[in-house]
């Protein structure tokens, strides 16, 4: 259960940050108050990040959970596979919208899914340890 909470808490925030950075128009970050502007926009957009990113983050968390139950997949490979699924999903979702299409935009928008999914998968690996099942004593 922790796995889904980690994905729902971290995913939309990190993805929203990357989408903000990558989706800004050219020249938007020029000027003296870059961090002030970034903080202001990030604070305003955080509720929308969670509103629209909550369900996709849980879906990617489900992919990670499915891969977690495949014993032959190592944690590192699971993180990469989860990130690749998120990469493809966001590249298709965001890369086909508007006039910004092409390989560059598919790669940039794919990173919006890859980075939060990989980070969330790593955090889930660190903090969502399977509960140890108590062993019954053996009687001879």
Image: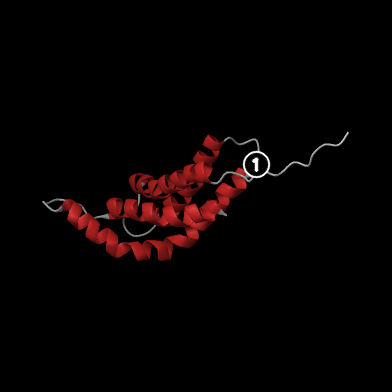
Residue 60 appears left or right of 107:
right
Whether residue 29 can be seen here: no
- The location of residue 90, given as percent across then percent down, is 43, 52
- The location of residue 132, given as percent across then percent down, is 66, 43
Q: Residue furthest right?
A: 140
> Is the residue 101 above or below the residue 68 in the image?
below
Q: Residue furthest left?
A: 32
Whether residue 26 can be seen here: yes
Q: Residue at x 71, y 44 (%)?
A: 134
> Is the residue 56 above or below the residue 129 in the image?
below
Q: Residue at x 31, y 63 (%)?
A: 45
> Is the residue 102 above or below the residue 53 in the image?
above
Q: Identify the element where label 1 is drawn.
A: loop
Q: Quick one: quadrant of the C terminus? A: top right
Residue 15 appears left or right of 137:
left
Residue 23 appears left or right of 94:
left
Q: Residue at x 48, y 58 (%)?
A: 56
- The location of residue 62, given as percent across then percent down, is 57, 53
Quadrant of the rendered image containing residue 37: bottom left
Residue 84 appears left or right of 97:
right
Q: Quick one: quadrant of the N terminus? A: bottom right
Q: Viewer-proximal residue, 71 or 113?
A: 71
Q: Viewer-proximal residue, 135 or 46?
A: 135
Q: Viewer-proximal residue, 36 or 114?
A: 36
- The location of residue 65, given as percent across then percent down, is 59, 49
- The residue pinned by badge 1 equals 70
Q: Residue at x 43, y 60 (%)?
A: 53
């Amino acid at each position: 259960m922790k796995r889904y909470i980690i994905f729902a808490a971290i995913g939309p925030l990190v993805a929203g940050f990357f989408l903000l950075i990558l989706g800004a128009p050219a020249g938007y970050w020029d000027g003296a108050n870059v961090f002030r502007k970034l903080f202001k926009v990030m604070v305003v957009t955080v509720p929308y990040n969670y509103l629209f990113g909550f369900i996709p983050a849980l879906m990617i968390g489900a992919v990670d959970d499915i891969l977690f139950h495949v014993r032959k997949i190592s944690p590192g490979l699971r993180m990469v596979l989860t990130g690749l699924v998120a990469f493809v999903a966001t590249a298709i979702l965001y890369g086909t919208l508007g006039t910004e299409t092409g390989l560059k935009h598919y790669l940039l928008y794919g990173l919006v899914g890859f980075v939060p999914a990989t980070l969330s998968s790593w955090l889930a690996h660190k903090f969502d340890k399977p509960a140890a099942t108590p062993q019954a004593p053996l009687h001879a």
